[in-house]
Amino acid sequence: MINIHSKIFIAGHNGMLGSSILRILKKKGYKNLITIDKKKLDLRNQALVQKFFKAKKPHAVIIAAAKVGGIKANMNYPADFIYDNLQIQINLISESYNYKVKKLILFGSSCIYPRNLKKPIKENQMMTGPLEETNDSYSIAKIAGIKMIEALNKQYKKKYICLMPCNLFGPNDNYDTNNSHFLPAFIKKIYFASKKKKNKIVKLWGTGKPLREVLHVDEVANACEFFLRKKIKKSLINIGSPIEMSIKNYANLIKKKIDPDVLIKFDNDKKLDGVMRKKLNLTLANKYGWKSKMNFSKALDEIIEDFKNSDK
């Protein structure tokens, strides 16, 4: 069993999710957390990853490392998204097996599921229909990682798992308006528009109609710690929240919190909408005993304030 004295390697500890996991595990008293900067260890290089595992011999591995981005980044760099994510996963999962890692957690996202599922999505619906084309390279890489873990669990009786969160937000997010996810992009655009004396206009991509589920990254970090120590039979588990609104409603809520005088205009480019809905079914996670405790309005206030402070 994994405990606070186990050696745990957090791959991707500088990213939004990885830094949250590192922070939460430290807060919960974990003593032997292993991290390394990507400048010192290229996770796409199998020989270097093998050397690292040989030296560190972790008991558990958390794969929060990934090449991620918003809809335009996925559309513009599909080869990078599939190559980098496949290489990172193959190296970390295979070396975890080779060095007898007891517990491995791979993170993906809800985009692994088919694009036209209207009801909350269950784990067994993966690979039951076409993927959303705008991010299929990332999705396919993540699906490959999930299937690799399922195969190891089946053939070698491992207990590795995959956690699939919805759209995340929180500290250390990416605020690049060309490559970020929608919440940080909205916060940045609306905040800077609010500082103008006149013509407080914000232009946003798409129609604003798609529905999105969101979750604070610390909730996912807590789920990670929960399932790290939990004995479970399933290898794929959705991690989400009760919060689901349209893109337009998120934009209007952020506008209300920052500056109600900002005028929001969508460019109505349907190609930038992505899937219309991808709400996750959370029955399995709830059955194991995990539920989101997020106060969305409070969490949104906190990250808006964090962004404002970072601009000073």
Image (cartoon, grey):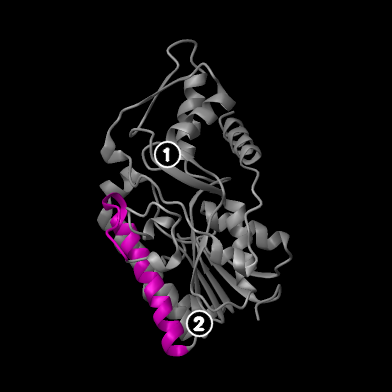
- Asked if the residue under mark 1 is in contact with the one under mark 2, i.e. CB atoms within 8 Å, the reply is no
> In the structure shown, which secondary structural element does the residue marked by tag 1 occupy?
loop
Q: Residues within 10 Å of mark 1 (few under 14, many from 20)?
A: few
Residue 67: x %, y % from top left = 39, 56
> In the structure shown, which secondary structural element does the residue marked by tag 2 occupy?
helix
Q: Label 2 vs label 1: CA separation?
A: 37 Å
Compared to 40, does 183 lie above or below?
above
Task: Using the rendered view, name the quadrant where residue 199 is placed.
Answer: top left
Compared to 255, does 2 lie above or below?
below
Instruction: Look at 62% across and 33% down and name the residue there.
Output: 305
Q: Amino acid at mark 2?
A: Lys
Residue 78: x %, y % from top left = 27, 54
The disc label shown at residue 176, or none: 1
Magenta includes 9?
no
Q: Nearer the viewer, residue 167 or 63?
A: 167
Residue 244: x %, y % from top left = 51, 44
Label whose residue precedes the other's in the sequence (2 or 1) = 2
Left/right of residue 265 with respect to residue 105 in the rendered view: left
The residue at the far front in this view is 119
Instruction: Look at 40% across and 53% down and name the residue there.
Output: 68
The disc label shown at residue 113, or none: none
Magenta highlight range: 128-156
Q: Name the residue tied to disc 2.
A: 54
Left/right of residue 71 with respect to residue 55 in the rendered view: left
Residue 190: x %, y % from top left = 48, 26
